[in-house]
Amino acid sequence: MKAGLLILMLSAEASALQTGEMAPDFALPDQHGEVHRLGDYRGDWLVLYFYPKDDTPGCTTEACTFRDDIVQIRDLGCKVVGISTDSQESHARFAEKYGLPFPLLADERGEVAGRYDALTNLGLLRFAKRRTYIINPGSTIAKVYRKVRPADHSREVVADLKRLVGEYRARD
């Protein structure tokens, strides 16, 4: 039984999205009802972060650190988008309460989180895993974060963006 579980876990990891792959497309409404698609961000760097639940301690910390670092992120030509399985209304309350200057997309059925290997599905209970993807201007995954510490994550992303954007510009 243990060997079977290990094989299942290894095969799931092997099928997970990897750096260099095209990012899966999405079309989801934000907290204001505006639909966002991956193609809307083509030509820009994108930090696409998945999180479990609005207005919970870890998710609030993560969102607020992205908020606090947004000027550095934007100066690198990058945009930030959060996704969870919460509703538009929940996202609107969360974004307003904490002054979040970026879209929060409502993936209520978890379909996009599933495409990004970021869904925990326990039957009636579905929520996004804490995962982040940096997507380059050509819609290719440039970096994947499978283990995220909310308090440090935004600083880690900013440091990686500086390196990735510099390398990308050097190739052009």
Image (cartoon, grey):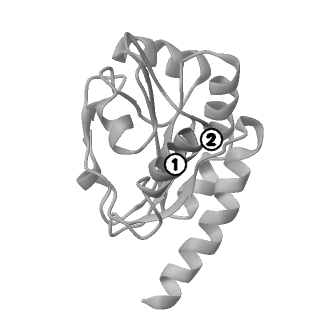
Query: Which labelled disc corresponds to residue 7?
Result: 1
Q: SS of the residue at dot 2?
A: helix
At 67% from the left and 42% from the top, the residue drawn is: 148
In whole angstroms, how far apart are the C-alphas of marks 2 and 1? Answer: 36 Å
- Answer with the quarter of the image where residue 114 lies: top left
x and y percentages locating residue 57 in the rendered image? 70, 19
Outermost residue, right side: 152
Which of pointers 2 and 1 lies earlier in the amino acid sequence?
Answer: 1
Q: Are marks 2 and 1 in contact (CB under 8 Å)?
A: no
Question: Which residue carries the number 2 mark?
Answer: 66
**Left/right of residue 126 with respect to residue 30 in the rendered view:** right
State which quadrant residue 109 falls in: top left
Residue at image x 25%, y 30%?
Answer: 34
* Within-10-Å neighbours for mark 2: few <14, some 14–19, many 20+: many
Q: Residue furthest bottom?
A: 171
The amino acid type, in three-letter code, at marker 1 is: Ile
Q: Residue at x 58, y 15 (%)?
A: 97
How many other residues sit within 10 Å of disc 1, few (<14), some (14-19) or many (≥20)? few
Query: Which type of secondary structure does the marked residue at label 1 adopt?
Result: helix
* Residue 130 percent coordinates (x, y): 57, 35
Amino acid type for the residue under numbered disc 2: Phe
Look at discs 2 and 1 and give the one toward the viewer. Answer: 1
Q: Quadrant of the N terminus?
A: top right
Q: Which quadrant: the C terminus?
A: bottom left
- Whole-percent x, y for residue 68 in the image: 68, 40
Q: Residue 108 bears which disc, if any?
A: none
Q: Nearer the viewer, residue 123 or 56?
A: 123
Location of residue 37 in the rendering, given as x and y in whole percent from the top left corner? 25, 45
Q: Quadrant of residue 53?
A: top right
- How many numbered markers are drawn? 2
